[in-house]
Image: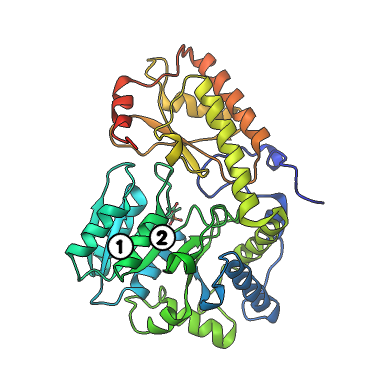
């Protein structure tokens, strides 16, 4: 059956309007209903197929890259990438505008390797000109780390702009494309990006359990001996996989099977462009509907990703996030708390196995929940709009 319909999740499960784990298809869940031997040829073939399919998503120049899956959640892959590709005497410019950029900086602290943190606060984008300035002032910087979509606000960072100045300054670009890869185009060869990471449970719509590093093969070869950690050593994992076709340590077999099914569904849907187009429709229907109820987005349209959107909590004293959350949950939708430090907010994800018809129901559910709570206006407090003015262009 072509999976063009988006049935409610099985057995009354709510939709997860979250940035992962997210709502997956029945076929993806069903793919986990058997056991695989990690050493067996069948599983080795699955790993090979998965690596090949992921590389096919990066477009022109893919032959210079390879794909190395790493057990664990996405943060394990970020740490594996930083620990493996940044030499011990290297220095990273970490571009942060939210929790994931700050987590990367904290990872550098743990690694005990040099870094310069550009912290733009909750949501302001790091721009090309300021990156160029920092690189010009500090010749010790060898790498730049950019977050593609900063999932804590939902901002789509200007990676092309950052890539351009990084290339011009002769430094190497690393990207955390965790929440964007598979739905937003990412062509590392064109960007001059030496390595990026993503994980199984975001836009490819698999279940959690591992992530993957996609890196230039010559960079992987040169990474030998760099890593601080055996289990996170990208070179060692790669060398072993090339030699034996196996993961070094126990692989997440069921997650890989589910992910392979998710990759096939991604291809059947029309690949990155169609996956992205569905998420854009999800966002557009949801944002327009909530704005019509009086809600305001943190970000102007230009910076809104089709991944997750941050809304200000209404000023109306009858509103509370906890009450809104419960009302949405009782109607079949799990939403996500906000992460802004200055004003109250909440987030609604657009990714996962759902389409714009589901999003229409999300808007309905929000309308009913506000009515139940006795919220007359969903308009945010003036302080929120003041905050937003900082984002001027
Ligand atoms: C999800 C995500 C991660 C990884 O988070 P985990 O909880 O470790 O899976 C890293 N960066 C970004 C931008 C993300 O969205």
Q: Look at 51% across and 84% down and name the residue there.
A: 240
Kindly tell me whether mark 2's CB lies below 8 Å from ligand 1: yes
Q: Residue at x 56, y 20 (%)?
A: 367
Q: Could you tell me which residue is drawn at 69 percent across and 59 percent down?
A: 267
Depicted 196 relative to depicted 339: above or below: below
Mark before the other along the chain sequence, 2 or 1: 2
Where in the figure is residue 293, as x and y percent of width and height?
A: 52, 19
The one nearer the camera, 1 or 286, is 286
Q: Which residue is mark 1?
A: 107
Query: In the rendered image, is residue 252 in sight?
Result: yes
| Residue that mark 2 sits on | 75
Q: Quadrant of residue 191?
A: bottom left
Q: Outermost residue toward the bottom?
A: 243
Q: Percent from the top left, x then y, of residue 45?
A: 68, 77
Residue at x 37% of width, y 18% of height: 315
Residue 256 drawn at (x, y percent): 61, 66
Q: Quadrant of residue 143?
A: bottom left
Mark 1, ligand 1, within 8 Å: the answer is: no
| Residue 32 left/right relative to 184 | right
Circles 2 and 1, Cβ within 8 Å, touching? The answer is yes
Kindly identify which numbered label has been placed on residue 249: none
Picture layout, residue 21 above or below residue 68 = above
State ligand 1's quadrant.
bottom left
Q: Give x and y (percent) for residue 57.
A: 59, 64
The answer to whether residue 322 is left or right of residue 340 is right
Q: Is residue 15 visible?
A: no
Furthest residue in direction right, as rendered: 1
């Amino acid at each position: 059956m072509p999976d063009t319909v988006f049935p409610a999740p099985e057995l009354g499960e709510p939709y997860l309007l979250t940035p992962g784990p997210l709502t997956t298809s029945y076929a993806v869940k069903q793919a986990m209903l058997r056991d695989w031997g990690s050493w067996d040829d069948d599983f080795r073939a699955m790993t090979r197929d998965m690596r090949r399919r992921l590389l096919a998503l990066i477009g022109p120049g893919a032959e210079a890259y390879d794909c190395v899956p790493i057990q664990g959640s996405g943060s394990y892959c970020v740490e594996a990438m930083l620990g493996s590709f940044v030499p011990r005497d290297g220095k990273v410019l970490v571009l942060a505008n939210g929790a994931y950029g700050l987590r990367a900086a904290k990872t550098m602290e743990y690694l005990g390797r040099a870094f310069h943190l550009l912290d733009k606060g909750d949501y302001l984008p790091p721009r090309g000109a300021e990156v160029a300035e920092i690189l010009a002032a500090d010749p010790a910087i060898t790498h730049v780390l950019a977050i593609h979509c900063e999932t804590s606000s939902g901002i789509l960072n200007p990676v092309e702009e950052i890539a351009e100045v990084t290339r011009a300054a002769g430094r190497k670009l690393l990207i955390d494309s965790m929440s964007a890869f598979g739905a937003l185009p990412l062509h590392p060869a064109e960007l001059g990006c030496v390595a990026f990471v993503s994980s199984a449970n975001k836009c490819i719509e698999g279940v959690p359990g591992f992530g993957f590093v996609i890196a230039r093969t010559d960079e992987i070869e040169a990474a030998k001996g760099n890593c601080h950690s055996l289990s996170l050593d990208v070179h060692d994992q790669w060398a072993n996989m090339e030699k034996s076709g196996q993961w070094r340590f126990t692989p997440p077999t069921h997650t890989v099977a589910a992910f392979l099914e998710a990759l096939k569904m991604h291809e059947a849907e029309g690949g990155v462009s169609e996956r992205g187009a569905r998420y854009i429709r999800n966002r557009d229907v949801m944002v327009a509907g909530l704005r019509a109820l009086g809600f305001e987005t943190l970000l102007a349209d230009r910076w809104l990703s089709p991944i997750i959107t941050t809304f200000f909590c209404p000023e109306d004293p009858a509103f509370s996030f906890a009450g809104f959350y419960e009302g949405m949950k009782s109607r079949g939708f799990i939403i996500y708390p906000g992460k802004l430090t200055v004003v109250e907010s909440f987030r609604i994800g657009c990714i996962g196995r759902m389409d714009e018809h589901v999003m229409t129901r999300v808007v309905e559910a929000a309308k009913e929940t506000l009515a139940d709570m006795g919220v007359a206006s969903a308009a945010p407090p003036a302080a929120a709009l003041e905050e937003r003015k900082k984002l001027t262009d």
